[in-house]
Amino acid sequence: MRFLRFLRKVKRSWSSHRTSVEVLISCGALLNNLEQYQKAYPNVAIAPVLKANAYGHGLVEVAEILEKKNLPFFVLDSMHEAMILRNSGIKTKILLIGHTRILNIETAKIKNTSFTITSLEQLEELDKILSSKRDIHLKIDTGMHRQGVLPDDLDRAIKIIKENRLINLEGVCSHLADAEKEDSELTEKQIEQWERAVGLLKKEFSNIKFFHLSSTAGSNLSSAVSANVLRIGLGLYGIDSSPEKKLELIPALELVSIISSVREIASGEKVGYGATFVADKPTEVATVPVGYFEGVDRRLSNRGFLKVGDKFCKIVGRVSMNITSIDVSDVDSVRIGNKVSIISARPEDENSVENIARVIDSIPWVILVHIPQGLRRVVVV
């Protein structure tokens, strides 16, 4: 609680000055993306996934934008995230999709929060110690084999829930392992297992409120499975990982900074740690006060680009902890204080999330969640 009060004080103090690095969050893009999914899949409710600091966008900022949209619940990973939202005044129902310690489920005092049960063993332990009513979503292992009650153990799980009046089976869920591929045999097998499990659970429990299997990648399957909720993570933030890519999504994040110094170096001069860049001609080099701490992956050294105005400027030398150098020779009138786009919100740009991921052989999720929580988030139109 003391730490959360401290964070609120810091947030208020930020309003009086500008920082050198900011994460711009587009309210319009987030709402557009939500609406795209609601229109494309009108038969299911959309549950935004806000875990991992809302995929690096800012947990509280994104929740505040979506709070009044009458959504079934926000999907979080941990009690810590839930506490942050509740202490920030967010009242939308919360589902903790990650593993929660049994003792924390028993003692939790966070209102309007449900817990995902990720194994039969966890359910058995909960059955032994629970002293007050809790809403749970039972996760079924349909074939991804990370978490969930195995189909062979489902009868035992049903027996426990039916005999314990303090366990309210509010929802049933699973997760698709291979939904990004079209015509995946594994996805077909998972759907078959899901349908069997849902059929059995519906026979035993008449008041289950939520059934959710698909996330962004499997959103195109939502009408073909027995589900009434669609969990949207990456797609909410403007990146479509589904095979069809039929929606008009808008990336919601731009990471920006400024030019902090400019200098001309002669041919043969070197830049940065290890002297990995050697100028082959007179070169104008600018530094930007961002580095791998701020989310500029070190693998972009001598490979990636930052954007100054309408020019893509190659990173020269190694990305340092808090400094990145770029070649601004082709940029007119570079000055200290000029805006630099570190991660662009334009998908076609060299420094978009997807293009950065391609260059370093990674995935967009990794790029986004490595943007530090401590950077200032600014909500823009």
Image (cartoon, rainbow, N blue to C red):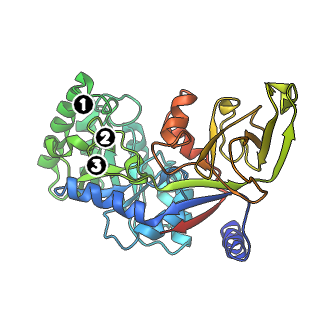
Residue drawn at the location 21% of the way across and 40% of the way down: 221
The answer to whether residue 137 shows anywhere in this view is yes
Task: Check the image and name the residue furthest to the top.
Answer: 185
Real-space Cα separation, disc 1 to disc 2, in angstroms: 9 Å
Residue drawn at the location 32% of the way across and 65% of the way down: 71
Label 3 packing within 10 angstroms: few (<14), some (14-19), many (20+): some
Residue at which label 3 appears: 247
Q: Position of residue 271 (x, y in %)?
A: 83, 32
Q: Amino acid at mark 1?
A: Gln
Residue drawn at the location 72% of the way across and 45% of the way down: 293
The answer to whether residue 323 shows anywhere in this view is no
Residue drawn at the location 31% of the way across and 40% of the way down: 174
Label 2 packing within 10 angstroms: few (<14), some (14-19), many (20+): many
Label 1 packing within 10 angstroms: few (<14), some (14-19), many (20+): many
Q: In the rendering, which numbered label is found on residue 190?
A: 1
Give the mark nearest the N terminus, 3 or 2.
2
Give the mark nearest the N terminus, 1 or 2.
2
Residue at which label 2 appears: 174
**63 versus 330 height, above or below:** below
Q: Amino acid at mark 2?
A: Ser
Q: Secondary structure at mark 2?
A: loop
Q: Position of residue 135 (x, y in %)?
A: 35, 59
Is 331 or 123 nearer to us in this picture?
331
Real-space Cα separation, disc 3 to disc 2, in angstroms: 24 Å
